Amino acid sequence: MRVDGILRVPGDKSISHRALMLGALGAGPSRVRGILQSLDVMSTASVLRALGVPVPALSDDLVMHGVGLRGLLAPTVDLDCGNSGTTTRLMAGIVAASPLAARFTGDASLSRRPMGRVARPLTQMGARFEHEAAGDGLPMTVHGGPLRGLTWHSETASAQVKSAILLAGLVGDVPAEVHEPVSTRDHTERMLLARGVDIRVDHGVVTLVPAARLDAADQLVPADPSSATFFAALAAMADTGELALDDVCVNPTRAGAFAVLRRMGARLTFEHERTEGGEPVARVVAAPGALHGAVIASDEVPSLVDELPVLACLAACANGELRVTGAGELRVKESDRITAIVSNLQAVGAEAEELPDGFIVRGTGRRPFRGHVVTHGDHRIAMAFGVLGAIPGSAIIVDDPACAAVSFPTFWQELARVVV
Ligand code: S3P
């Protein structure tokens, strides 16, 4: 297989959600350029509209008028978060601090995902959570109101939990301190700082000092490293050629997969390194190499948690073993990704084994893979196996390719374009 081309994958999903939320809470007009126009980000836009924020249709260059930290209105409809955990958990923090009640709903996958991880700290701050079904999923009603400050020791390394607490502190005008077991993506912190909020980070402890207002801001959204990794992995498993991925966010809290690709033997370099939109950005150039195994443990997982499906697929065509542990969080993503990765790798003829908190893939070199992939509607499973299926002679049928639209609507066209 030969790959060739220059790609600019769509805008970063995490930053896009936050740009809309902080734009909504800002004082005055905020401009967002390069926002990801995908289903998940549309969920955030429509939830904000239901709370009275005039969010325009998503476009490459948009201006939105913030309603300020205390300007949200009580919704008259459910807050439908679709498939998006980030929408649900971060908006739960914002609603918890607002004098209103809102009912959060979502699709079948999202409804099963644990919300107790945000409900617990936000309840301790003074909000009230009601879950309709057994467990701590959706539908869930959040009763917001006056909050008290919180110091929270997170049991799971989760940027969504950290962000929910910080946003609740911001809107509720109370101090918030989050201790993380391992540092997670820090976009919320960077974006709050850029909007005039006093937020401090010291040895894994993030502290927010109450702020009277949130400045409006211009946000340039860099290309999503999670989306870029599909194409970096594709280049790594090719026989010849190279792919250049432009404007990729290479924030160290997100760039773990690029380090693993290098450890597995791919040739990968960062060019034109610079800062854009408050984030380190580079052109990532990826090319094939002699692929071998690697070990990924808990300290590295947050920096590549969404990239593990495609790293697992890449490992199937390496010569050696990829061993991942400390990644129990994969069980509560859009699907149980440990089971989805392993059962689908087995279904297409690769050797893989489940661990309670991870998996092992025993690679047997570049060769065709054939079989049916069951995505469970999980976008990253669909795209990871799409990459594996690009190997010549492969015949991988993905049951629901359209679910890529959650984070990367143009994925299949781009894939077809760069394999030459
Ligand atoms: C995200 C955080 C991660 C990640 C998700 C996006 C964010 O989830 O998997 O895709 O934007 O904060 P967790 O916080 O559950 O680890």
Image: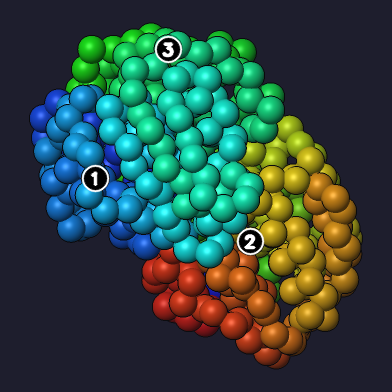
On the image, the x and y values in percent for residue 264 come to 76, 53
Disc 2 is placed on an element classified as loop
Disc 1 is placed on an element classified as loop
Q: Is residue 302 left or right of residue 81?
A: right
Label located before the other in sequence (2 or 1): 1
- Which residue is at a point 42% across and 54% down the rendered structure image? 105
Q: Quadrant of residue 23?
A: top left
Three-letter amino acid code at disc 2?
Ser
Q: Which mark is residue 75?
A: 1
Mark 3 = which residue?
A: 148
Label 1 neighbourhood size at 10 Å, few (<14), some (14-19), many (20+)?
some
- Which residue is at a point 23% across and 25% down the rendered structure image? 69
CA–CA distance in space, label 3 to label 2: 35 Å
Q: Nearer the viewer, mark 3 or mark 2?
A: 3
On the image, the x and y values in percent for residue 63 come to 13, 44
- Which residue is at a point 53% across and 56% down the rendered structure image? 111
Q: Is residue 417 visible?
A: yes
Q: Which mark is residue 113?
A: none
Disc 3 is placed on an element classified as loop
Q: Is residue 166 visible?
A: no
Quadrant (top left/top right/bottom left/bottom right) for the N terminus: bottom right
CA–CA distance in space, label 1 to label 3: 24 Å
- Which residue is at a point 59% across and 37% down the rendered structure image? 116
Three-letter amino acid code at disc 3?
Arg
Q: In this rendered view, identify the residue nearer to me: 87 or 284.
A: 87
